[in-house]
């Protein structure tokens, strides 16, 4: 909103700035500059700075006084209040700035009589460049009874905490804060100071849940187990008197901090339990909904996850005054929603959510693009999935999961050079090395693949190890690797069924009982293995497999033979593919698809007359065959030219 009052017309004589500072030279000038046009006095109480803080405050016109630090923020705050002379006080910290979006609304707030103080929005810079959002009580009438601070740390105004004054929110002022980033915290001794002070608070007020919150947050980084113990103490006090904290957003922060520790440890049940307890008090918290939605996905409760993510994206959640993680009210919740919908088989709805998430996501957030890529890959749309994985990799190149998904997509697209480059950057990671070994095997470098597989500890590597030995002619080690893999693989695994079948075909030992090994749609991994043998010129083995194929029965073999024939032709093994197609034509002379693929082979061999005849035969059997009609049109056009 554009201000309608200039600073010259603003009633600045009604409000004064009160600050306590120590060694804030980094940001104090910026803070004072942001507020100087809107206050009639600037009071700065210095508690022992050794840098240029005092000089900067004086340069900007502040009235500076000195107060020896006594390990109690409330005492220092009250010293500043004692020096104030204006009706209203605005409280800022040295690492904050204030923006006035509407000077008219600000002026009206100072001149009205209904409210005694206001909470204003503040956004705090996170290490990843995003912002957390909250409301803080910073503007109030100075002279009212009880407008004195208490509490050594995270100090509060007595009258406000007791509900003895009329308060509201004021959105025309916005605060921005950058003092919680790791770099800023590390530059001072804030962490140790806060731990020392917060421990004193718990000793002086052991029955106050807020004191345990302060202590829990102070030690969260250095002592996670201690933090959880302090949080449990606070939760017990809260449960004993939940009404006393019904509007206290610090309770949400406390639950979220405990949830984050359990989440990092994979304790899904604890995350669910804590989030549900907190949501009973704060049902509109987007952060709590977001966290429980993720836990529900991990617990395979996809319906519940959809419910929570939708709630996090609702108007009620957007109106909630505390947002710790910006992802909870936008891109993150939409990504989680898309993930849950995908797992429920509601792919089109998932795509709609994920498209919005990819558009909203900040530069460092890769999950939305990863999820979209995974969904597209599940649909077989590898070419469409590739750009999403590439973008995710650009955003998060150090994430091994992102790199592996990109490499797998590139592998499926036969973009082997690019896939290999991505995998080489993840050297010595078992999953990456396994995929790299598969790539090397498929591109004729079995010896290099063998060197990688020999040291790979993943059970899944044994399957690829067996094939590597086999194409190199090491039949006994191949059998040993396959047997070991089969022993570790569940019966329902489609690759296990395919390998058992394939080994029977290789040994010409198939019989009618073998047909029971195949599902109605045999695993396409079989196709890849046939092609692998052809790449390594194992023609004898391929012939053996094809001779054994009819023993699979009429319900399986014709379909499988046709699939192999097409795969061989597409991969450049035209002669082998044609041999299968001729066999198919003898058994199914009215199958138009057989003649189409024979015509395709003729085109590849530049035998246009034969191709013309074969495409005509295809159309005789299947007049609407689209590829054959298109091929005939192209041949006719070429003849005219």
Image: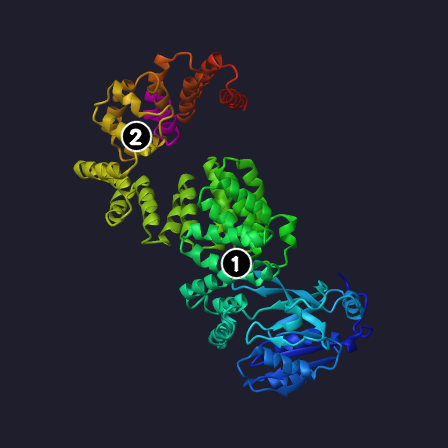
- Give the x, y percent position of residue 82: 68, 83
Q: Quadrant of the N terminus?
A: bottom right
Q: Please check the rendered image and state whether residue 577 is part of the magenta-colored stretch, yes or no.
A: yes
- Residue at label 1? 239
Where is residue 301 drawn, in percent x and y?
48, 41
Residue range corresponding to the magenta coloring: 561-580
Per the image, the residue denoted by label 2 is 497
Can residue 241 be spotted in the picture?
A: yes
Q: Earlier in the sequence, mark 2 or mark 1?
A: 1
Tell me where residue 196 appears, x and y as whole percent: 47, 76
Judge left or right: residue 105 versus residue 282: right
Q: Quadrant of the C terminus?
A: top right
Left or right of 426, for residue 296? right
User: Mark 2 against mark 1, which lies toward the viewer?
Assistant: 1
Q: Is residue 203 magenta?
A: no
Element under label 2?
helix
Residue at x 40% of width, y 30% of height: 570
The residue nearer to you, when weighing 127 against 230, is: 230
Q: Position of residue 138 (x, y in %)?
A: 67, 70
């Amino acid at each position: 909103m554009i201000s309608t009052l200039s600073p010259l017309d603003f009633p600045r004589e009604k409000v004064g700035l009160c600050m306590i500072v120590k060694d804030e030279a980094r940001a104090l000038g910026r803070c004072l500059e942001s507020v100087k046009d809107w206050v009639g006095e600037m009071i700065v109480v210095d508690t022992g700075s050794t840098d240029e803080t005092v000089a900067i405050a004086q340069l900007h016109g502040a009235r500076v006084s000195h107060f020896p630090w006594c390990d109690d923020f409330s005492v220092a705050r009250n010293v500043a209040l004692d020096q104030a002379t204006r009706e209203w006080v605005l409280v800022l910290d040295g690492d904050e700035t204030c923006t006035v979006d509407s000077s008219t609304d600000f002026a009206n707030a100072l001149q009205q009589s209904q409210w005694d103080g206001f909470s204003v929005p503040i956004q705090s810079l996170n290490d990843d460049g995003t912002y957390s959002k909250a409301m803080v009580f910073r503007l109030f009438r100075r002279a009212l009874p009880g407008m004195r601070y208490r509490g050594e740390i995270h100090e509060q105004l007595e009258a406000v905490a007791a509900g003895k004054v009329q308060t509201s929110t004021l959105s025309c002022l916005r605060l921005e804060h950058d003092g919680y980033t790791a770099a800023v915290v590390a530059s001072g001794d804030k962490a140790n100071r806060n731990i020392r002070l917060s421990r004193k608070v718990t000793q002086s007020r052991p029955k106050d849940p807020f004191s345990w919150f302060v202590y829990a947050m102070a030690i969260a980084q250095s002592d996670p187990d201690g933090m959880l113990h302090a949080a449990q103490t606070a939760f017990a006090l809260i449960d004993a008197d939940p009404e006393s904290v019904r509007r206290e957003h610090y309770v949400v922060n406390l639950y979220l901090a405990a949830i984050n520790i359990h989440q990092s440890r994979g304790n899904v049940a604890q995350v669910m339990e804590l989030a549900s307890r907190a949501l009973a008090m704060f049902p509109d918290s987007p952060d709590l909904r977001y966290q429980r939605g993720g836990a529900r996905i991990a617990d395979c409760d996809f319906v519940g996850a959809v419910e929570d993510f939708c709630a996090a994206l609702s108007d009620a959640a957007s109106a909630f005054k505390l947002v710790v993680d910006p992802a909870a009210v936008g891109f993150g919740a939409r990504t989680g929603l898309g993930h849950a919908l995908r797992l429920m088989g509601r792919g089109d709805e998932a795509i709609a959510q994920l498209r919005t998430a990819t558009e909203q996501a900040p530069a460092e957030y890769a999950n939305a693009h990863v999820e979209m890529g995974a969904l597209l890959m599940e649909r077989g749309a590898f070419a469409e999935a590739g750009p999403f994985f590439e973008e995710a990799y650009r955003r998060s190149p150090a994430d091994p999961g992102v790199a592996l998904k990109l490499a797998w997509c590139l592998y499926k697209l036969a973009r082997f050079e690019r896939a290999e480059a991505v995998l080489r950057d993840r050297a010595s990671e078992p999953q990456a090395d396994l995929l790299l070994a598969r790539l090397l095997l498929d591109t004729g470098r079995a010896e290099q693949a063998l060197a990688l597989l020999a040291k790979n500890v993943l059970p899944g590597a044994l399957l690829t190890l067996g094939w590597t030995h086999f194409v190199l002619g090491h039949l006994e080690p191949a059998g040993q690797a396959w047997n070991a893999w089969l022993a570790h693989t569940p019966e329902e695994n489609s690759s296990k069924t395919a390998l058992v079948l394939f080994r029977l075909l290789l040994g010409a030992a198939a019989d009618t009982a073998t047909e029971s090994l195949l599902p109605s749609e045999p695993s396409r991994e079989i196709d890849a293995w046939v092609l692998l043998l052809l790449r390594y010129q194992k023609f004898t083995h391929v012939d053996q497999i094809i001779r054994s194929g009819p023993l699979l029965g009429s319900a399986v073999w014709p379909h499988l033979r046709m699939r192999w024939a097409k795969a061989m032709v597409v991969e450049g093994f035209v002669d082998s593919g044609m041999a299968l197609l001729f066999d198919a034509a003898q058994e199914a002379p009215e199958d138009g698809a057989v003649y189409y693929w024979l015509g395709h082979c003729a085109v590849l061999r530049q035998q246009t007359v034969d191709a013309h005849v074969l495409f005509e035969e295809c159309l005789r059997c299947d007049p609407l065959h689209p590829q054959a009609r298109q091929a005939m049109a192209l041949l006719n056009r070429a003849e005219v030219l």
